């Protein structure tokens, strides 16, 4: 059992979501270790660089505590997706250098064509994160080809930010989580301008629990679906169907 009481076998199977409304989604669990015994959460806040491989099966996955050495070997593993990695400027500024250093060590070893899950957070959280987005783009451009598939997770940028990323990395996907509920008008405009075939839904559980829930879980993914669908003027079902197709395409399921 992981910290959330989820057995490893359940991590990649269908999860009934939306309080029994009948939607079913496949769920990716970020941050589990190679044996499936990891905590199964986004990233460990004690880590400065948080290079956490995303576990898709037992052939891959790494405990972040193992440091830089195993990165290359693990990144070459056939089923290994890279992430989440990125810049989190909500931590004290003295940590920022370490984050960049980790990225500079890691990014040169990312195989071409391998999806990379990106975490970006500005000094004040989701708002005013423009400089952090720009710096991350600069780092990615230095080490990765523009065709690299990227997944900007828990994305909250405005329209200009969306368009800039689409221009720079055409194979990019944008993941939305529960923070859509508090989006300002520019962030909503950003959400609306993302092409339908580039949208993903996520919960970031156990973080960002929706209103009325003490703890987030993948089973609440449908609530994110409701938020995104409403902002885009479509049905939850249509949005979740598109998001599932997109995730399948991106993560080769
Ligand atoms: Zn994250």
Image (cartoon, grey):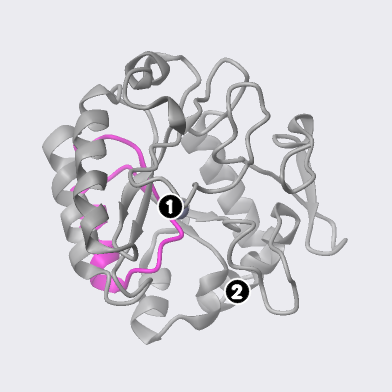
The residue lying at 30 percent from left, 22 percent from top is 111
Image quarter of residue 160: bottom left
* Mark sitting earlier along the chain (2/1): 1
The residue lying at 64 percent from left, 40 percent from top is 39
Q: Do the residues labelled 2 and 1 touch (CB within 8 Å)?
A: no
The foreground one among 118 and 63 is: 63
- Residue 114: x and y in percent read 37, 27
CA gap between label 2 and label 1 equals 17 Å
Residue behind mark 2:
227
Q: How crowded is mark 1: few (under 14 residues within 10 Å), some or many (20 or more)?
A: many
Which mark identifies residue 214?
none
**Which quadrant would the N terminus be assigned to in this image?**
top right
The foreground one among 58 and 160 is: 58
**Which quadrant would the C terminus be assigned to in this image?**
top right
Image quarter of residue 170: top left
- Residue 113: x and y in percent read 33, 26
Q: Is mark 1 on a helix, strand or loop?
A: helix
- Foreground mark, 2 or 1, reads 2
The answer as to whether callout 1 falls within 8 Å of ligand 1 is: no
Which span of residues is magenta-colored?
Answer: 146-172
163 left or right of 253 in image: left
- Residue 166: x and y in percent read 26, 54
The answer to whether 35 is drawn above or below residue 96 in the figure is above
Residue farthest along the bottom direction in this orientation: 185
* Magenta region includes residue 35: no
215 left or right of 135 in image: right
The answer to whether 152 is drawn above or below residue 109 in the figure is below
Which mark identifies residue 198?
1
Image quarter of residue 213: bottom right
Q: How crowded is mark 2: few (under 14 residues within 10 Å), some or many (20 or more)?
A: some
The answer as to whether callout 2 falls within 8 Å of ligand 1 is: no
């Amino acid at each position: 059992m992981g910290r959330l009481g989820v057995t490893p076998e359940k991590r990649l199977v269908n999860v009934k979501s939306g309080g029994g409304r009948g939607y079913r989604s496949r769920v990716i669990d970020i941050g589990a270790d190679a044996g499936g015994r990891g905590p199964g959460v986004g990233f460990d806040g004690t880590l400065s660089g948080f290079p956490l491989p995303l576990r898709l099966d037992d052939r891959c996955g790494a405990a972040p505590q193992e440091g830089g050495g195993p990165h290359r070997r693990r990144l070459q593993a056939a089923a290994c997706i890279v992430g989440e990695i990125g810049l989190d400027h909500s931590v004290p500024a003295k940590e920022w250098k370490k984050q960049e250093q980790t990225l500079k060590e890691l990014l040169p070893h990312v195989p071409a064509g391998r999806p990379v899950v990106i975490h970006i957070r500005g000094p004040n959280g989701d708002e005013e994160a423009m400089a952090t987005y720009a710096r991350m783009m600069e780092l990615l451009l230095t080490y990765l080809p523009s065709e690299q598939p990227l997944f900007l997770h828990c994305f909250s940028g405005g329209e200009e930010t969306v368009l800039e990323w689409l221009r720079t990395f055409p194979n990019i996907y944008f993941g939305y989580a529960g923070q859509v509920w508090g989006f300002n008008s520019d962030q909503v405009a950003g959400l609306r301008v993302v092409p339908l075939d580039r949208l993903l839904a996520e919960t970031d559980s156990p973080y960002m629990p929706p209103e009325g829930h003490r703890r987030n879980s993948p089973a609440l993914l449908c609530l994110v679906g409701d938020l995104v669908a409403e902002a885009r003027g479509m049905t939850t079902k249509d949005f979740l169907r598109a998001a599932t197709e997109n995730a399948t395409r991106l993560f080769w399921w």
